[in-house]
Image: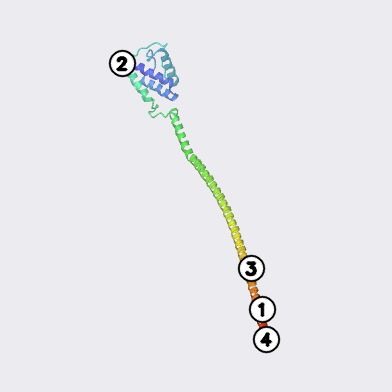
Amino acid sequence: MALLEGLAALAAKFAGAGTVAQVATGVGIATAGVTGAGAVGALPAPVQDAVASTVETVTPFDLPGSDDDLVEDTSSTEEPVETDDSGVDGVGDDDTTGDDGTADDSPEVESPESTDDEGADDDSADGPAAEHSRGEGTAAKAAREAEREAEKAARDAEKAAREATREAEKAARDAEKAARGAAEDAAEQAREQAEEAAESAREAAEEAAESAREAAEQAREDAERAAEKADDAG
């Protein structure tokens, strides 16, 4: 039963294993003594033929097919079972070791890991570049923002300067208007004062002339009265 299970496992291994694994398994079978006609009848005919064909292809040993005569081993029936058990164990050991007992480094097995490692290395190598690219994009965006802020500040400063200029011009116009108004007021006041002074002088002159006439009239009347008195006395 152990021989049947071992060879069935071997047949499954032959169906899916690579070339290196097939050679190692074939050597394990030869080492276990499963050669010649000793395994005839231990497996179903299709499995027996597949195992025999595979072993003959990848090893120098000859394993009989299902149409070969069954030859009984001269040893006891228990020995093949024990030998097959050791053969199965040997096959299990040979899966990880080669002919010289060293570890079997299969490229088919290591290749995916190597590919993953290379992919990880590529990712790690691309990481700084991607970070640098993102950093450049952030710096460019910050520069554009700073440029827009500077342009806005310049526009605001220009607008403030225009407003200040307009305010200064308006203040100058207001000051000029105020000065002109003050000058006009002063001139009007001076004219009024001059007119008042002239009117006062004219009135004073008229009063003086009237006083002089009155005085002359009084003097003439006095002189006439004095003359009349003199005539009366004479």
Decide: few, some or many residues near mark 1? Use Cα within 10 Å; few <14, some 14-19, many ≥20. Answer: few
Give the CA separation, mark 3 to mark 4. 55 Å
Q: How many marks?
A: 4
Quadrant in the rendering for residue 221: bottom right
Examine the rendering and report whether any part of residue 34 can be seen: no
Ranked by sequence position, the earlier of labels 2 and 1 is 2
Q: What is the quadrant of residue 47 in the picture?
A: top left
Q: Which of marks 3 and 2 precedes in the sequence?
A: 2
How far is disc 2 from disc 4 in space, using C-alphas? 215 Å
Residue type, label 2: Glu
Image: 206 above or below 101: below
**What residue did someone put label 3 on?**
195
Q: Nearer the viewer, residue 200 or 179?
A: 200
Report the disc number at residue 217: 1
Residue linked to disc 4: 232
Q: Earlier in the sequence, mark 1 or mark 4?
A: 1
The label on residue 161 is none
Q: Which residue is mark 2?
A: 78
| Crowd class of label 3 (few under 14; some 14 to 19; many from 20; radius 10 Å) | few
Query: How busy is the neighbourhood of tag 2: few (under 14 within 10 Å), some, or many (20 plus)?
Result: few
Q: Secondary structure at mark 4?
A: helix
Query: What kind of colouring is applied to the model shown?
Result: rainbow
Depth check, mark 2 against mark 4: the one in front is 4
Camera-near label (2 vs 1) is 1
Residue extending farthest to the bottom is 234
